[in-house]
Image (spheres, rainbow, N blue to C red):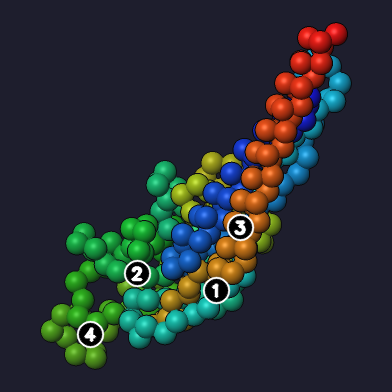
């Protein structure tokens, strides 16, 4: 009885964790450049002092969906998207380099070039980008940032920096809890090299690649599985009570 109860209990818990993963995808349907997370369940033996005779279900996130999301034209000069595969380099919360597809950029009050998550964009040399005062700004396909100085004419346009773009192998990057991607199993300080082949599209934003119908269907399916696990726990408890009554009669 206890084995069946343990399996049902662990299954219900993991169903809840799986629903959380799909709910997070649903919550980020409108997040620019968001990459959906995959979710799967597998059997995991319980190891201890004896043979692993018990098995429980374990939910895990094996990877993310790296397919590009749909692009939307905004005609805003600081909105940029990546054509096909690749990433922007930004400064992560820990101060180290990380990668994202979120290209809704703006210049903050300190002159820093940041995206909608307030992650500072890094240049091809690995340093955070600072934008001097400007009248007009443009970002080219190779990431070159050009500005027109205040009060200056067309002759005052000058290239001031270049956005770092990287394109590591899909299997070599993984998403962190902060939603940013980093090199998998990398040593501290390891970063991806600048990749000139990554092309930027100005005046566009990449939308989330979450499939709403697929995510909602999975949430409903997992909820039904959760209800089945709870019912199984109730059935095991009833069977245990019936067994106890039989032993009392004897």
Q: Which residue is mark 1?
A: 69
93 in relation to 153, above or below: above
**Number of the label disc, if any, that sits on residue 156:** 4
Specify whether 33 is left or right of 12.
left
Mark 4 and mark 2 in contact? Answer it, CB < 8 Å.
no
Residue 103: % across, % down: 42, 70
Instruction: Find the distance from the CA under tag 1 to the CA under tag 3.
Output: 24 Å
Specify whether 6 is left or right of 30.
right
Residue 83: % across, % down: 54, 78
Is residue 230 visible to the viewer in this orientation of the structure? yes
Q: Tell me the residue at 26%/67% (across/down).
A: 107
Mark closest to the chain's N terminus, 4 or 2: 2
Instruction: Find the distance from the CA under tag 3 to the CA under tag 2.
Output: 36 Å
Specify whether 249 is left or right of 113.
right
Q: Which residue is mark 2?
A: 105
> Observer-nearest residue: 41 or 2?
2
In the rendered image, the residue lying farthest to the left is: 151
Mark closest to the chain's N terminus, 3 or 2: 2
Instruction: Find the distance from the CA under tag 4 to the CA under tag 2.
Output: 23 Å
The quarter holding residue 250 reads top right
Q: Residues within 10 Å of mark 4 (few under 14, many from 20)?
A: few
Q: Tell me the residue at 59%/44% (across/down).
A: 16
> Observer-nearest residue: 86 or 143?
86
Q: Nearer the viewer, mark 2 or mark 1?
A: 1
Q: Which residue is mark 3?
A: 220
The quarter holding residue 124 reads bottom left
> Observer-nearest residue: 230 or 160?
230
Instruction: Find the distance from the CA under tag 4 to the CA under tag 3.
Output: 58 Å
Mark closest to the chain's N terminus, 2 or 1: 1
């Amino acid at each position: 009885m206890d084995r069946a109860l343990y399996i049902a209990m662990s299954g219900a818990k993991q169903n809840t964790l799986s629903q959380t993963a799909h709910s997070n995808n649903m919550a980020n349907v409108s997040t620019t450049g968001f990459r959906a997370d995959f979710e799967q369940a597998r059997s995991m033996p319980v190891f201890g002092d004896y043979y692993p005779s018990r098995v429980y279900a374990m939910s895990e996130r094996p990877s993310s969906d790296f397919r590009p999301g749909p692009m939307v034209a905004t005609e805003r000069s600081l909105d940029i998207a990546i054509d096909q595969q690749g990433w922007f380099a930004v400064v992560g919360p820990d101060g180290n380099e990380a990668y994202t597809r979120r290209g809704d950029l703006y210049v903050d009050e300190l002159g820093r070039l940041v995206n909608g998550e307030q992650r500072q964009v890094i240049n091809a040399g690995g340093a955070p980008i600072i934008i001097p005062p400007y009248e007009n700004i443009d970002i080219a396909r190779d990431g070159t940032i050009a500005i027109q100085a205040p009060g200056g004419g067309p002759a005052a346009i000058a290239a001031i920096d270049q956005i770092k773009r990287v394109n590591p192998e899909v299997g070599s990057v993984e998403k962190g809890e902060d939603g940013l991607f980093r090199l998998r199993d990398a040593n501290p300080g390891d970063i991806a090299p600048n990749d000139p082949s990554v092309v930027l599209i100005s005046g566009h934003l990449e939308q989330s690649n979450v499939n709403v119908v697929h995510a909602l269907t999975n949430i409903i399916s997992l909820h039904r599985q959760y209800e089945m696990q709870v019912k199984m726990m109730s059935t095991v408890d009833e069977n245990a009570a019936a067994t106890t009554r039989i032993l009392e009669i004897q």
